[in-house]
Image (cartoon, rainbow, N blue to C red):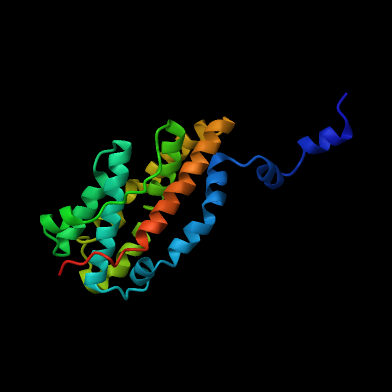
């Protein structure tokens, strides 16, 4: 016999059920919301957003991003995709190969030694490309209207959304396992923390 309490629990409105049983994507979003919001206010990104960044400052920001993504690709064994995009942008901004090679690398990358931890970190790295296409046109003042100099921000272009949905599918495939959920969330938080700390020194490297 089904009790009234049981019946009403099964009939609970969908929004409330989501609060009790969030998807892994929702759990990741909630866990990283604070640092994500802080990064929106990062001085370099804010200057890109409002179109006030100077060419020298933009190059410093690219250098810092390069140092993070090289370290991430090394830690995960990934192909040098984002670092390649950044190297292309840096060349457009007047940085030669020696300057790029001299850029410091992030040394505080968290351990990404399980599939779940890797997916948590990819949630951070892949998610960062979603806002890039919005920011890219804000650089028209220093780069003109051509795409040169903003290859990193443009990411995969029209394929960005599809890549993001594919990653979310992989994330939700492990979402039923409590241990893997915990690993993914922890890695996402640690990766975001490493990224935030690393970007604090975005003006430290200068080679004019």
- Number of dots carrying numbers: 0
Name, please, the residue furthest toward the front: 107
Say which quarter of the image contains residue 131: bottom left
User: Residue shown at 25%/74% (left/top)?
Assistant: 54
Q: Is residue 144 visible?
A: no
From this view, report whether residue 47 is shown above or below residue 25. below
From this view, report whether residue 191 is shown above or below residue 57. above
From this view, report whether residue 130 is shown above or below residue 13. below
Give whichever of 13, 72 is nearer the camera: 72
Name, please, the residue furthest toward the bottom: 52
Tell me where residue 171 appears, x and y as whole percent.
Answer: 48, 36
User: Residue shown at 27%/66% (left/top)?
Assistant: 204
Say which quarter of the image contains residue 77: top left
User: Residue shown at 51%/52% (left/top)?
Assistant: 32
Tell me where residue 71 appears, x and y as whole percent.
Answer: 29, 46
Say which quarter of the image contains residue 141: bottom left
Q: Is residue 172 visible?
A: yes
Q: Horizontal placement of 129 versus 19: left or right?
A: left
Give whichever of 135, 161 is nearer the camera: 135
From this view, report whether residue 193 is shown above or below residue 93. above
User: Residue shown at 21%/56% (left/top)?
Assistant: 103
Q: Horizontal placement of 84 versus 154: left or right?
A: left
- In the picture, which quadrant includes the N terminus? top right
């Amino acid at each position: 016999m089904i009790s009234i309490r049981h019946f009403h629990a099964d009939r609970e409105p969908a929004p409330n059920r989501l609060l009790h049983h969030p998807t892994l994507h929702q759990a990741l979003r909630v866990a990283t919301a604070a640092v994500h919001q802080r990064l929106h206010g990062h001085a370099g990104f804010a200057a890109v957003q409002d179109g006030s960044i100077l060419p020298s400052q933009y190059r410093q920001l690219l250098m810092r991003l390069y140092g993070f993504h090289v370290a991430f690709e090394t830690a995960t064994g990934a192909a040098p995709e984002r670092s390649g995009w950044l190297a292309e942008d840096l060349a457009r901004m007047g940085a030669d190969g020696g300057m790029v090679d001299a850029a410091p690398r992030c040394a505080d990358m968290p351990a990404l030694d399980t599939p779940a931890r890797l997916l948590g970190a990819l949630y951070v790295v892949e998610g960062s490309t979603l806002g890039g296409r919005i920011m890219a046109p804000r650089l028209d003042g220093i780069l003109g209207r051509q795409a040169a100099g903003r290859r990193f921000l443009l990411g995969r272009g029209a394929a960005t959304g599809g890549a993001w949905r594919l990653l979310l599918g992989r994330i939700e495939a492990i979402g039923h396992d409590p241990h893997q959920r915990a690993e993914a969330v922890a890695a996402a938080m640690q990766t975001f923390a490493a990224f935030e700390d690393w970007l604090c020194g975005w003006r430290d490297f200068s080679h004019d």
